[in-house]
Amino acid sequence: MHTVVAHEPPLASVLPDAEHWLGFYSELYEVYQREGVDAARKAFRSGMGMETTTKPPRRTELPPDELAEMLGRIRRNHVFWFEHELKPYPAYRPNLRLLKSFSDKLVLAGGDARDTFPYRPNTVLAEHTGNAIVHLPGGHVGYVTHPEEFAAALREIVRP
């Protein structure tokens, strides 16, 4: 049996205020086109309520050369994300009835920032599927900010 862990999926379409959030993503795309990746990334973080640091603990930092390579790859991926994923992901409308039929294979997971956008779609999915939301350490990028704790909690979720 396979399990899907939906950690804070960006499904704006399921929210009661979906139009607001889909508008946010459209505006974000315009910022990206006008001002570039850095300005759009900053606007995204602000709009998502991700004001705190998203750096890993010092003990888990990569060596400088590996870090530089990874950051370069992430920057290149940002362009792809803004061009091809930014607007379609939030607008996707899942078949909630079908999703409920697979609720035994679905884990809805969220981080510590329960009052921010990233957490909210799973609250709606939980209502439709009857699944509880499993809390993982850290915020939206808890896998970066709390890697050991996040991995241990995730292991417990997917362990057969």
Image: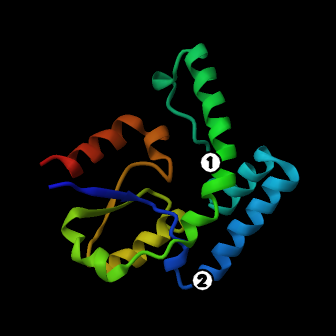
Residue 6 screen position, x and y as percent: 37, 59
Residue 143 screen position, x and y as percent: 43, 42
Which of the two discs, 1 and 2, sits closer to the camera? 2
Amino acid type assigned to the residue bearing label 2 in the image = Asp
Q: CA distance from mark 1 to mark 2?
A: 25 Å
What residue is drawn where x is 27% and y is 40%?
152
| Mark 1 residue element | loop
Answer yes or no: do the residues labelled 1 and 2 have beta carbons within 8 Å?
Answer: no
Nearest the viewer among 147 and 104 is 104
Crowd around label 2: few <14 · some 14–19 · many ≥20 (10 Å): few
Q: Is residue 45 above or below residue 106?
A: above
Q: Quadrant of the N terminus?
A: bottom left
Amino acid type assigned to the residue bearing label 1 in the image = Thr
Residue 60 screen position, x and y as percent: 46, 25
Residue 19 visible: yes
Q: Which mark is residue 17?
A: 2
Nearest the viewer among 79 and 127 is 79
Nearest the viewer among 108 and 72 is 72
Residue 116 visible: no
Q: In which quarter of the view is residue 106 placed?
A: bottom left
| Mark 2 residue element | loop
What residue is drawn where x is 68% and y is 53%?
82
Residue 71 screen position, x and y as percent: 63, 29
Q: Which residue is mark 1?
A: 52
Residue 122 as seen in the image, left or right of residue 3: right
What residue is drawn where x is 75% and y is 60%?
29
What residue is drawn where x is 45% and y is 46%?
142
Residue 84 as seen in the image, left or right of residue 28: left
Residue 147 as seen in the image, left or right of residue 40: left
Total label count?
2
